[in-house]
Amino acid sequence: MEEATACFIDHGREDLMSGLGSRIGCRFLALFGVGWLSLCVSSPAAAQMGHVLDAVGPVNQSMAGAGTALPLDSLGALHWNPASITGLQGSEIGFSMAAFAPDLDLASSDPFGNYGRTSSDTDIDPMPAFGFVYSPKDSPWAYGFGGFAVAGFGVDYSADPTNPILGRPGGFGALYSSYQMMQVNLTLACRVTDRLSLGIAPTINWSSLAVDPFPGFPPDPPAGPGLPGHYLNAAHADSRWGLGLQFGFFYEMDNDWNIGGSYKTTQWMQEYAWNSIHADGTAETVRFNMDYPAILSMGLGYTGLKFVDLAFDVRYIDYENTDGFSETGFGPHGDVKGFGWSSIWTFALGAQFHVTERFHLRAGYGYNENAVPADVGFFNVPAPAIIQHHLNTGFSWDGPHGLSLAFAYHHGFHNGIRTEMVNPGDGQPIPGSTVTSSMATHSMTAAIYKKY
């Protein structure tokens, strides 16, 4: 019985150029940051809201990702709402690095009573972020440039003869997946009235995907009577580029309330293609389409309390209308059509406490619906994106000369999904069988900022 799962924008120009030209050091930092980011984004990030990261940078992370209407730092503002960069307290550049550690387990049983459980051999993955916002004095315009790790997943299960889904013949044998995505945006925002700002940001994306075995292509015929076919290998990661767009608004009311919203379009990616080989030595190119889903964000921010700022965000992530996620199940030749994820709502609540003029504590809680329905859990073993509850905390310290340091800790609470194995031959569940994926996450994030 073969396991299957598929993985996957001229006004203010002179103002901008004259300001940047007088700040050679900041330009150098920006260029350094781009190179640093490109070097660091080399490991898969197991993400939170489905495969979408719930936050960027330690300030936004400690608020559980809430910040669409409460811009606290360049990283979170650039990522969630391009219009909100006008709400920052001047210009800023920031570098962030997160260390992410998922706990993953896969258990299965067959109709004959055999049962096994295997832990994924996953490492601590780096997740970098870079943000640069320039707000010329006495100008309604603000400009930004950011680069972030925004999505990912990955598992590494060794072959396990005691675990039916990882045993051979009959199961996958060893199971490996690695997906990562980095997003760069060029942001332009304008304060069109004293209270209302509008922003737009074209997005450029880079992603890498590897899966072994790869079930999105029909398996080779069985090697003998009673034996399953074998899916091809797509472990040599293929990298692809994509484009999208994000736009938003940010409105500051006269009663200490802010409201903000943004829409990030689908990020349309190139088709993945791997050079593989059949069991008989014949070369084959296997292909798969997987885009990044559209995200609608709405948020409230409140700054009317002396020592506390509050933020609340709601997002809708549209997996159901995204290539690679919209379909599921087996094709007529045993190939898997896609993940079959559901579109989900997510919620984030964050609080910032001003302990002193320079020291700030933060805490946040996030919740998202499960993108992986129970009945397609079998097809999502390489991408068990099932975390739903997130707890976050952190702090920042504003030092001299405009320098700030920030730190955050994140915990994604353990969750599991249980379903039956599915027979590739007829696409029907196998009575008496089970497949259970479970996951918990931990991460620590640190950043340094320069305000000027």
Image: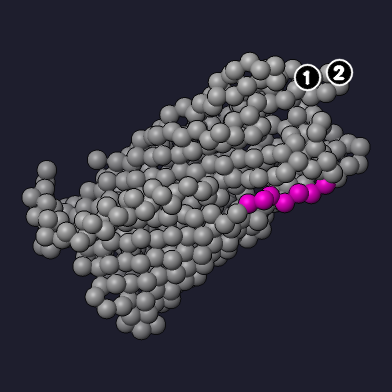
State yes or no: discs 2 and 1 in contact (Cβ < 8 Å).
yes
Report the residue marked by disc 2: 225
Amino acid at pointer 1: Pro
Is residue 75 shown to the viewer in this render? yes
Residue 120 among magenta residues: yes
Distance Cα–Cα, label 2 vs label 1: 7 Å
Q: Residue at x 73, y 47 (%)?
A: 106
Q: Farthest residue to the front: give it.
A: 281
Vertical placement of residue 242 versus 398, above or below: above
Which residue occupies the foreground of this view, 255 or 372? 372
Q: Quadrant of residue 193?
A: bottom left
Note whether residue 77 is visible.
Answer: no
Where does the image place residue 350, in percent across and percent down from the top left?
45, 66
Q: Which circle marks residue 222 in the picture?
A: 1
Horizontal relation, residue 34 to residue 99: left or right = left
Quadrant where the image shows the N terminus:
top right
Which quadrant of the rendered structure holds the C terminus? bottom left
Q: Position of residue 321 (x, y in %)?
A: 49, 33
Residue appearing at x 40%, y 34% in the figure:
241
